Amino acid sequence: MPQTRGRIFDDLAKMANDAAGVAQGLRREAETLVRTQAERLLSTMDVVTREEFEAVKDMAAKARDENDRLMARIIALEGLVRSGEYKA
């Protein structure tokens, strides 16, 4: 009788192990399916990558800096014109 019980426990452990393997495989398949669907959805939308966003953000910051520099120059030149020190 003890050998039968040991074999039953071995069979149950094997079945539990197999079930865990199947569950893990199903989880991987579900993740792949969700990832594929998300990528398909994103490809139909008009979205940009993080790299593209950062590049445009840097360009905008440089343009603002240049705009501020030019505005300061215009204000300085207008001051010279008003004071009469500069004549075009």
Image (spheres, rainbow, N blue to C red):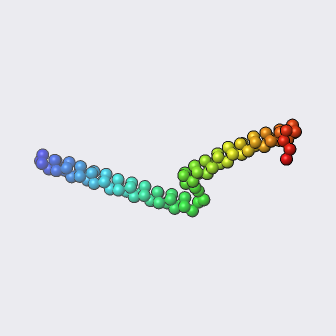
Front position in the image: 36 or 53:
53
Task: Locate residue 46: give its quadrant.
Answer: bottom right
Left or right, 64 with reference to 47: right
* Callout count: 0
Which residue is at the far top?
Answer: 83
Closer-to-camera residue (1/59): 59
In the image, is 26 to the left or to the right of 52?
Answer: left
Expressed as whole percent of the image width and height from the top left, the position of residue 69 reads: 71, 42
Task: Say which residue appears at 42% left-offset and 58% top-offset.
Answer: 32
Residue at figure coordinates x 16%, y 50% from the top left? 7
The residue located at (57%, 49%) in the rendering is 54
Residue 67: quarter of image? top right
**Image location of residue 13, percent across then percent down:** 23, 49
Horizontal side, residue 80 vs residue 4: left or right: right
Q: Is residue 8 left or right of residue 55?
A: left
The residue that appears at 67% across and 43% down in the rendered structure is 65
Indicate the quadrant where residue 75 lies.
Answer: top right
Name the one closer to the observer, 1 or 57: 57
Residue 39 x, y percent position in the rendering: 50, 59
